[in-house]
Amino acid sequence: MQGTNKTQLVLGIETSCDDTSICLLSGLPGKDAPSPEVLAHLSFSQEKILKKWGGVVPEIASRNHLAKLTPLIQEAFEVAKKDPKDIDLLGVTTHPGLLGPLLTGLSAAKSISLIFEKPILPVNHVYAHLEAIHLSKNVNITYPYFGLIVSGGHSLYLLVRSPEDFEILGNTRDDAAGEAFDKGGKLIGLGYPAGRVIDDLAKEGNCEAFDFPIGLKHSKDSSLSFSGVKTAMRQFLENNPEHILKDKTIPEEGTPERKNLADLCASYQEAIVKALALKAKFAMEKALSLSGEKSLQLVVGGGVACNSRLRTSLKEKFIETYFVEPKFCTDNGAMIANFALRNFESAVAFPECLSLDAKSSFIKKTRIVRKKS
């Protein structure tokens, strides 16, 4: 698509995992444009539905997306007081994620495109997590910048040169940070998801009470690993079963049991946070070398970016650290619509966009391939 200086109306659709999220936003396209205006942002979380399963079940998630997408899209247009025919572009997550949920969202986008003959921008929602920083009105982020994405499925460092140019500097070799939080919490008996619960309990505890390993602590590179700390938690609980919650009930405040639980959560969280902060140092050095800059802003996005201890730790270590607003940290339609708007010229025109497909794996391209309209 050719560039334009006119305000664009964008519909964003996010269904990569268990959250169904829709957003309508309006703004100027391109990397130098000011923050767009969010006209409607609606989400449905399957957290309570999937809680009894202890995690995401792809088939159940897909069926719930299918049930919620149409009413959410209809409500979004009602809230924004817009007509579907007025949209200029659709942005939809196509990778990475669970294939069933991804295809559900993509099918919805294609249906709207077919009816109104609108272009589609296929979105890598991992990259969209970082670019969501531009949804904040009072934050001035310039390219290039150094990015850290921490979520349930991904933990990686990137050098971001533009909205379409991402270079991966370091990645996890096994589990993601968010997965370590959730699975560690599940072992304790905190249920799913456990990240927020661990964060809240950790505020009451002593982070030095128990010793948990920092993954790849002695490797002077930007690689991450969280399988070791998760295994350490499992072994600790096998040797100290009194720390496993009975009936998954959190003890009352002021009790010795509550103090022990808070100490355990604080110590486990500290190991994860220290690993992320330690490896960020090496990734930043690499980013500075590749970019030729003397300093870079650090942008942190993804669900784990809401963790209070991580926020404190990174702000202590890096002068210019910016976090995506909590409401835009988890998988959401606003970051998808925003990413589509910033990459407006790379959208796939109708009817070619009807041939787009979804991919469950992370596609490691450093640049978006721009197709001719």
Image (cartoon, rainbow, N blue to C red):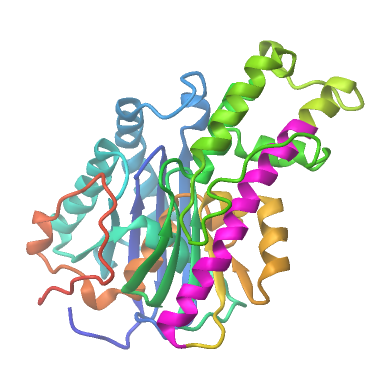
| Residue situated in front as seen by the camera: 235 or 69 | 235
Q: In this view, does 255 lie to the left or right of 153?
A: right
Q: Is residue 96 magenta?
A: no
Residue 202 image offset from top left, x and y in percent: 76, 39
The answer, for residue 81, to whether it is visible in the render is no
Q: Which residue is drawn at 38% across and 40% down?
A: 17
Residue 125 image offset from top left, x and y in percent: 36, 56
Q: Residue at x 67, y 11 (%)?
A: 247
Q: In this view, does 343 lie to the left or right of 35?
A: left
Q: Residue furthest top?
A: 247
Q: In which quarter of the image is the C terminus?
A: bottom left
| Residue situated in front as seen by the camera: 147 or 173 | 173
The answer, for residue 295, to whether it is visible in the render is yes
Relative height, residue 261 to residue 72 (above, below): above
Residue range (magenta) = 263-292
Q: Is residue 286 magenta?
A: yes
Q: In which quarter of the image is residue 119?
A: bottom left
Q: In which quarter of the image is residue 169?
A: bottom left
Residue 365 image offset from top left, x and y in percent: 25, 65
